[in-house]
Image (cartoon, helix red, strand yellow):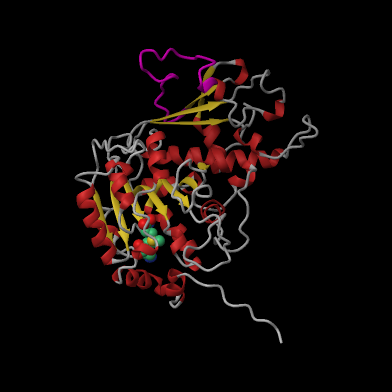
Amino acid sequence: MAHTPNPPVQGRLISHLAERSAEDQGSGWSALWDSNESDLWDRGSPSIALVDVIEQQKDIFSPFTPDRRRKRALVPGCGRGYDPVMLALHGFDVYGLDISATGVSEARKYASSEMQSPQGYNFSSGTAKAANIGNVKFIAGDFFSSEWESEALRDGEKFDLIYDYTFLCALHPSVRQKWAERMSHLLHPGGLLVCLEFPMYKDPSLPGPPWGLKGVHWDLLARGGDGIRNIAEEEEDDAKAAKLTGQFRRAHYFRPARSYPSGKGTDMLTSCPTSASFWDYPACSAAGKVAHRPAIVFNCANEHTSLITYPVDNLTAVPDLAAVLEGDLTDWVSRTANSTLPRNQQNIPVYRYQHAGQYPNLNPFRWLGAYHASDLPMNVGSYPIHDCSDGSLLIPQLPLVAKVLRFGADGKAVQQVDRVEIDGPCRGIRKYDQFP
Ligand SMILES: C[S@@+](CC[C@H](N)C(=O)[O-])C[C@H]1O[C@@H](n2cnc3c(N)ncnc32)[C@H](O)[C@@H]1O
């Protein structure tokens, strides 16, 4: 007779939620809050990994937007509210969301004492030193429903920052794609999704929660997968990565020096801005979401050429120039044109520049042209074009409704060209010149 192995011993959390369908998991969590079982997951303090990163990377995690508006942050599945409170103590206006009314009431109790007299664990130094603190508000609602949104956002508003810790891993795998869609819907274009990835050590095929998440965030957010099947390693080839269909790109990925003991050494911190390729500028501008301030928009003439695979064993062989041209137009010039047009229609000044220079010492290959990043020597000032000590722009200003400043072509440092010469080919007018 065949030996039947004993079923694995399941934890209380796993067995409790296994009894419910994927749609009914939320009420399962609420039941656990109501029966006072939050100690099954409650770690009793904010994410020290997040505390460290927001204190160390102040440029990315400034609590203010450039126009000095306080940034709005969301922590979905916030439990007792440790992370929302910690973010508010660092200056953000924070919304903690949880499906359990009991959980939300616990979070409000926690916040009312903690915001008055914060404990040291909210700060890297271990010493409370809050200044210029934001507000924290808790909302009872289902992350997957839009019903609660009006309690946090007025018309057209979105969040600047969303933090996920032990929320995705608490959810049934069948809703992972919806989780990614909701994240993208709730964030501003360019807003930041920060996830402390846990548990990374657990086999993803084993039952949860917590569900093992190794590779899942990247698959959902950047690759556009379902977070379940064919989870692949992160794509390192830039050209291939640029074609991924996920609504985020991964900007930072690192193992935090400090994290909870349960994940220490395996937790990973990932921060993902919404992907620029998903910013639909015409749609944003139609909704009035274009920044009403002058914009600088800058391309290289043959931007895509360094992003196309070319024969590395024969550097003088030319890559597929038709593919380069298509990339120049679809991935670069069209986006530039699409962001210029609606701004111009609203009379917002746009300063357009095209880098067309070839530096023979950097680029001996004529076919490479002015490629992605070849403008860096100029941007960082190796080729000073204009004295900006008076605080003016680095490069001369032009009210560029119709003109673009082109740098480095024809042996000239700078010249004006008609914008139609560059943007026209995106609309079928003229041929695009990759080597002006
Ligand atoms: C594992 S706990 C993590 C809590 C918190 N992040 C922490 O670190 O203490 C998951 C939390 O998500 C909440 N939750 C589950 N499904 C939810 C949903 N659909 N919308 C909002 N919250 C949800 C649960 O009530 C629970 O508080």
Q: Quadrant of the N terminus?
A: bottom right
Is residue 416 shown above or below 240?
above
- Percent x, y of residue 9: 52, 72
User: Magenta region: which residues?
Assistant: 378-403
Image position, residue 62 (x, y; %):
35, 36
Q: Which image quadrant is residue 12 in?
A: bottom left
Is residue 331 toward the left or the right of residue 30 in the image? Answer: right
Which of the 4 image quarters holds residue 300?
top right
> Which residue of the protein is positioned furthest toward the right in this rendering?
314
Ligand 1, seen in the image, is in the quarter at: bottom left
Q: Is residue 157 visible?
A: no
> Residue 68: x percent and y percent?
28, 35
In the rendered structure, does residue 402 fall within the stretch colored magenta? Answer: yes
Is 101 one of the magenta-colored residues?
no
At 44% from the left and 19% from the top, the residue drawn is 394
Q: In the picture provided, is 372 more to the left or to the right than 114?
A: right
Asked whether 395 or 349 is in front, the reply is 395
Task: Please provide percent x and percent y for residue 31.
Answer: 33, 72
Q: Quadrant of the C terminus?
A: top right
**What secondary structure is the magenta-colored segment mainly?**
loop
| Residue 75 visible in this rendered orientation of the protein | yes
- In the image, 190: left or right of 382? left
